Amino acid sequence: MNVLVVHAHPEPQSFCTALKNRAVEALENQGYGVTVSDLYAMKFDPVSGPADFGARKNPNYLVYALEQRQGQETGTLAPDIRAEIDKLMAADLLILNFPLYWFSVPAILKGWIDRVLISGLTYGGRRFYDRGGLTGKRAMLSLTCGGREHMLDANDSIHGRLTDMLKPLLQGTLAYTGMTVLPPYAAYHVPYVDDAVRAGYLADYAARLADLDALAPLSFPSLDDFDEQMRPLARRPNGE
Amino acid sequence: MNVLVVHAHPEPQSFCTALKNRAVEALENQGYGVTVSDLYAMKFDPVSGPADFGARKNPNYLVYALEQRQGQETGTLAPDIRAEIDKLMAADLLILNFPLYWFSVPAILKGWIDRVLISGLTYGGRRFYDRGGLTGKRAMLSLTCGGREHMLDANDSIHGRLTDMLKPLLQGTLAYTGMTVLPPYAAYHVPYVDDAVRAGYLADYAARLADLDALAPLSFPSLDDFDEQMRPLARRPNGE
């Protein structure tokens, strides 16, 4: 099994970076091949735009998704995108490792998603969710945050549930491309906890990675339940 | 009233850019002062990191939020951040105008959020939601997307509700800082609709902007309902 860890923290001594390092160690100990894209270390450019394409299908009007398809077909995507796509396609498991910024990924990681998960390859037309281009791969978020767990663990928690806050990532990105999405790993209250708690987080995370098959994947829509126009075949009473 | 429109689309001829232009026109026609931050045109750098700070509180270990506070207090934030903060603080209404990328903002706009909505000024400690630093301002998302409205308008729609997908932005970002959040304006199926439909979207959007007071703001948590540890004072039966 090959694993791609995409890591996005500006401080190499951070606990978030320690989580990434522990993941690499735990996965390599099991004999997995591990590749890390350390976006800050790579100075990864997160801005999608015309410079992402060598030969444009339409040089006068940029439709980003259409140029992604064209760039993939003609092999003219920017080399930094191409390199990340190659790592992604070689991976059986994708881990996005990041500090929660505004209940989402830092911009540098959002740009990896915007630029690397290209149309035509990872999704396109009616190929999304369980018909997405990355079916067969697994994906997981591992994140650090400043809030306490009880602020994110129930519908009436102050921020609601973490999985609801992460819906654009869990469903709208990872599941959208067809990947099997494992529950996110979150280390809470990180700036305020002591070394013993941090060591506990690292041990918990390593134990989770040592037994990935024990994790029940999250559930997402199946295109089997929608018609050609993507309307539900059977409406639930609470649908409207 | 002053309005700040933060716009993020790489194609100046795009319909998303037309929405931005129509907003400027509609708001100026009402006598509002309008400022636009066109992030692609500005080549805005979305990557948060050590270069955002002149004099560091701790040069050996970057805690981004703490350095934001220090940078604000000492006037040593990077000039591009300072300029955006000044525009934001002068605004009564903030509009984020963007194409929906992976059910969220493009990376260049996520970076504006990461770098400009600084700790200490827009939130901090127990100052968030209705005690956030930007109370008294209003905020709105205006976005274009490829999907059809029926794919995002009900709990059993294939992607669920748009407002649930946008929760990290609507609640986790705009409401978190204390702003009053107006319902998002979304133009659907944009790459596939004809000019008449697009003209209709522009007219609808201008009409909405001409009568902002008619829009009922979205509802979000109040800190009045939570204790000092941010636990709910009264648990709802469905909370757990």
Image: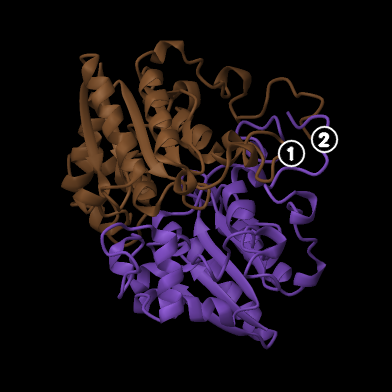
Chain colours: A purple, B brown
Percent of width and height locating residue B39: 26, 47
Residue at 58%, 82% (x, y): give it: A90
Label 1: which residue? Answer: B156
State if disc 1 and disc 2 touch (CB < 8 Å): yes
Q: So how many labels did they put on this image?
A: 2
Q: Quadrant of residue A218?
A: bottom right
Residue at the spot of label 2: A236
SS label for mark 2: loop
Residue B145: tell me if it is visible: no
Q: In terms of depth relative to the viewer, which is nearer, A222 or A44?
A: A222
Chain name for mark 2: A
Task: Depth check: give the residue in front, B158 or A113.
Answer: B158
Say which residue appears at 65% left-offset and 78% top-offset.
A92
Residue B205 got which mark? none
Query: Measuring 33% from the left and 23% from the top, which residue is drawn there?
Result: B93
For numbered disc 1, what is the local secondary structure?
loop
User: Picture quarter containing residue B161?
Assistant: top right
